[in-house]
Image (tube, grey):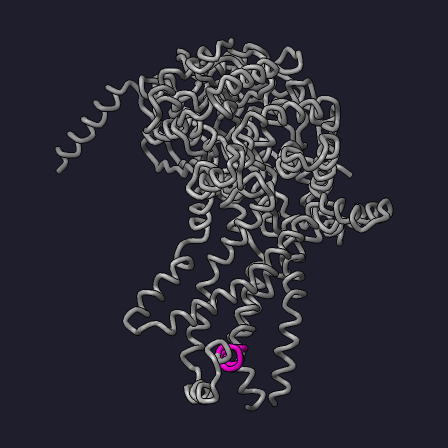
Amino acid sequence: MRHKTFLWFFLPTGLAMLLFIAMPIVSVVTQSIFAPHPAVLIEVESCTPLVGCTTETTVDQEATATLRAESPMGRFVGLGIYFDRGHLAIQEVGQIWATNDTWDGFFSELGNLPFYRAMAFTLSFTFIVTPLTILLGLVIALAVNSLHRHLKGLMIFFSLLPMIVTPLIGSLILFWMIDSRGVIGNALVNLAGDPDFSLKASTGLMWVALMVYGIWSSAPFAFVVFYAGLQTLPKDQIEAAQIDGATRWQQVKFVVVPHLMPLVTFVALIQLMDNFKVFEPIIGFSAGAHAQSLSTFIFNDMNGETRQLSSAAATSVITIIGIAILLSPVLVRTWRDFKGAR
Amino acid sequence: MFLKKVALAGSMAAFAASAGYACEIGGRVNIVGNEFAAIQAVAAGAKECTGASVESNLTSEHQTINVAGLSGNPSEYTTAIIANSSLVALMNEDVIRPLNDLVEQHGQELQPGQLIKIGDNIMAVAFMANAQHLMYRRDILEQAGVEVPTTYEELLEVAKAIREQGIMQNPVGGAYQAGWNLAQEFNNMFLGYGGTHFKPGTAEPNINTEAGVNALNMMKALSEYMNPDFLTHDSNATNAEYRAGNVAIMNMWGSRASQQTTTEGVLQEVIDGHAIAAPMTVGGGSIPATTLWWDGWTVGKNISDEEAEATFIAMKNGIRPDMLNDETTPLAVWLIEGYEPSEDAQGVFAAAKMGTPPYPMLPYMGLMHSALGNELADFMQGKESAEQALADIEAAYRAAAIEQGFLK
């Protein structure tokens, strides 16, 4: 293709990418390196019903308006917000490093910093849920594929249900089931023989519940992709394997899985991205006491009485960088395969 | 045709006259506010005005949209109905206007106590008060042979008696959900022990004190008598437990008092045994461990003078004295002239009489509340000491306050 033709061909896509992908990222990065102006505070008398008048501190609007007019972008702070305690906490980590001789002590104190605790959960969630989702999706796909054709349609519909249910609703349903007065929660109380046993009060069990939800809700996606892949499985290879006396397990291991490998890479990419941004189950399960993720940090920053835009923006940028790091091995591998194929 | 119009106008006038008031406005009114019965009644009153459109968007997510909705010019909303904690957020963003001129022109009938003054400026008009206070099951307390507690120390005794006699395993209720609710319970207890959140006149945090440690230890002691899932229970879930007969005693919002017995599906024994009392003190303090709240309305800054005037008139119509009737009176503790407190209101009035402090109206209180909500759960689960938790909260608050320009 001539360069000029290519340019015109690519222009609409390029413009859309600039507008909807590049610009928002630029805006978020800008937002994260500027913070609101220092507040000019004054003391005034404030009067409220049933209480009377008290002296309160408030923001001097006129003085603040002047500051805002002078530099509407706010106060330039560079990477200050990235390094503060709510994010990478460089200074605090340095102190913890200096005062701890053992790795044990270092990690337990590191877990007290919100960012690192959130990362501990997010990474565990990502690396446990992603492979299990792929495995479960593959098993469902193989099972459905071997069914009689009359049953297939129905089973496909049921297998897709978790994906059809709105994520927040799905997590709320599970949340009520594991409540100590819910079906599963109550059964566990009876099993444990302890009336005070509570799944929601235990961090470990809450993590398990969140991960089970994560696998349950995204397995249908993996299933659909693998099921589509199975329809393109070459019959002759399977027959050849059968003639050679391969068992069903050997057929799956040596013929089916290698055939589906590009799809596994695809599902892994999507799932790594999704799971790193885990959000709905934490909100739905009210699991804030046990698990946090970068996405819930952004939600909390934006949801308080005082919105912390700069902090939320910094967390967003860290999320983008985190996903880029997470995906790099898969992307590098895809690139190598691509070059090898040429 | 002409006759028809005359007849219509005549009947309209007669209707207005029979209702005893006429509310005419000359500009658009658009309300954003929380969604509960009392606020719905106020919005309905504002919508009775004629002459221009009166719209409303009442949603529990109002806090997340009111700043943005008042920011444009002209802004989407002309008024926000808010609680005292949100007034600060609106003032920090400079999106509401002082009401002094409008009060002078149209607000003569308003009670002086309804006007929220910050310095010389009237920033909001309050119409209802709210506070958390004691709600309990009279029948259960009688069965256990204990008195109604007036302090948190007594409440622990009551809870112990109820558990030991096998009446209930977890008799204490509390909105201890990690986040906003848990932080609010800390605020109550901390103020009850005589703490102040900030060093006077500055944004420097001041919670890592003896009062803070005492507050946390008391909360921990109370949680021993709560449903083990307490960190996931917000005020709705706590009330559900109460109405289901699983909770005998709790510190709960006064605005919920009238619904405890009228909600569908409440057990008969709960309806019969439900009682309310004054908020409790703690640690020998004289002021109750709770905070006083008000709900009121504001007028946006980024709208024309006609719209501001129309908004003021319409909102005042929503809180006029004769909007109080058999249906609306029990919905809240109204600050409106002529309001006769019902049974359900005595908890809030007792709170006011006992000198309950208002929820701190400081520009940086929102950041402190968020920091408390995010960091307290570790202590409640027994993962760290009270001192460590308080130090973490101060550090988290400090980072946020530096970002927002309140601290250097």
Specify the farthest residue to the front: A245
Choose between B87 and A238: the one closer to the eye: A238
Choose between B278 and B348: the one closer to the eye: B278
Left-right relation of B109 to A38: left
- Does residue B351 lie above or below B305 as drawn? above
Left-right relation of B353 to B307: right
| Residue A250, image x, y percentages | 51, 79
Q: Residue at x 59, y 29 (%)?
A: B184
- Magenta span dominant secondary structure: helix
- Does residue B376 lie above or below B331 as drawn? below
Q: Is residue B367 visible?
A: yes
- Does residue A50 lie above or below B172 as drawn? above
Report the quarter where the C terminus of chain A lies. Answer: bottom right
Q: Residue at x 46, y 68 (%)?
A: A139
Report the quarter where the N terminus of chain A lies. Answer: bottom right
The residue segment tinted magenta is A252-261
* Image-quadrant location for residue A157: bottom left
| Residue A298, image x, y percentages | 60, 49
Left-right relation of A59 to A185: right
- Does residue A273 lie above or below B186 as drawn? below
Residue B177 shown in magenta: no
Residue A255 shown in magenta: yes
Choose between A102 and A2: the one closer to the eye: A102
Left-right relation of A190 to B22: right
